[in-house]
Image (cartoon, grey):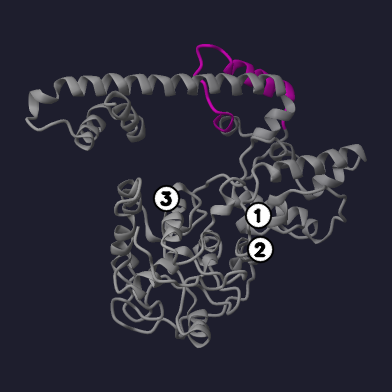
Amino acid sequence: MPALLPLALEGVGTRSIEALPSYLCRLAAIHGTKLGELLTHVAHGTDNGSRLLRGLHAQTYSALVRPNTTTEAVVKLIARGQAESHQNLERGTFLHLRQALARAQGTYSNQIRWCPGCFHEQLLDQGHAYLKLSWFLVAVSVCDIHRIALRDCCPHCGHEPKPWRGWTSFEQCPHCDGRLDLITSSDAKVLDPEPAACDLVDLVGELACATQPFPAGEANRYIAHRFEEAWRQEREQELWKKLPRDECLRYQVDDEPITLAVARRLAYRLEIPIADLLRGGAPSNRTFGFATAVPLPTSMRSAHRNGSIDSAVLVKQLRLLLDPASEPLSLRKIAQRLNVSVGAMRYHAPLPVAKLAERYKRHQRGVRLEKQSAAVRAVLDGIRKWHLNEAAPIANKTLLKRLMKITGLPKEVLRKAIKDCRR
């Protein structure tokens, strides 16, 4: 692939690290082209280049910070062009959270947001503005430095920037050329610390100097160690004042997914940084301080469930779901239906819960195999009937589009079946 001009990612090692989407826009600008054209150019001729471009076109510009395969592929592609090191490019995304945290809607912003005060300071210090990685988190709605709400549109014309179409200077509106680095009368000061989400900004600071991803399951194991230590010393009631019993029992299980919102809540209650929770480490008995004396911040609160749990009734309800005639459900859906947490179900009825989990796993395996078999049958039938309607040779892409409309099966399942059948 062609070599790219070198360009350093801003803010490496600090809480103000630049986001990958911002870096890509600046990289396109120094090459005198638009972002989409740059990515098309560097992806041309590479393995899975066309698949990557399709994935990019299917998502928003701001999604390039998310911990997924598309972001990972873009990082590898740009690093191969030697514009910046692979390690630094990863630091400009949330890829290091991929193993440790489960995905959840509402975590990452779909909009481009910025602080005009930060833009102005960046212009003075670096000579250009850039988008910080922390601004791509939904919970961060206020600048932690200037305490003003992040903007998502031009204060002059009201248009939202469209980076795919070109945005050469972040301090200037691409639509009306108005300055975006000026604080106006509409930028009211926000004194409430909660919208600034300083705990998340601190986590971004940890990502900015990380050398490897946060490991999977360490947060669950940390909660389990804390619970075991409290139980051994007969201090579980003291622990539950800080971390509610249902949450403690739920998230101590290794395979219970923890999202960023949940990690924030757990870290706040345990009075440790989010990064320390995600790394795990040796448990210790800590003094239970301020977090038990003040209400949990609104943005961290989970859905409230009323009433105590009757173990006998819960066991009976779960056993009814083991009836072969009932539809296999995931533990999360069962918990939602019964208005309890998954952790509470595991605690009060471990045997029925284990059977339900295994039953659902078998069901999912069967559904997956059935889809694969249906895809193979559909592909073979499509190949057999191809020349009845087409004079041209069989084209995998056209066949895939046709079968998706006819069968409604997932794209990846059909694509694999076509590849296997046409070897």
State the quadrant of the N terminus.
bottom left
Label 2 sits on what residue type?
Asp
Label 1: state its secondary structure.
Answer: helix
Q: Amino acid at mark 3?
A: Thr
As drawn, which residue projects farthest toward the left? 391
C-beta proximity under 8 Å, tags 1 and 2: yes
Of the numbered discs in the image, which one, if any, rests on residue 15? none
Q: Which residues are magenta?
A: 309-333
Q: Marks 1/2: CA distance? A: 8 Å
The alpha-carbon separation of the residues under discs 1 and 3 comes to 26 Å
- Crowding at mark 2 (Cα within 10 Å: few <14, some 14-19, many 20+): some
**Which numbered circle lies on residue 70?**
3
Residue 281 at least partly seen: yes
Q: Mark 2 and mark 3: span between their CA atoms?
A: 27 Å
Disc 2 vs disc 3: which is toward the camera? 3
The quadrant of the picture occupied by the C terminus is top left
In the rendered structure, find residue 264 and report the number of the disc placed on it: 1
Q: Secondary structure at mark 2?
A: helix
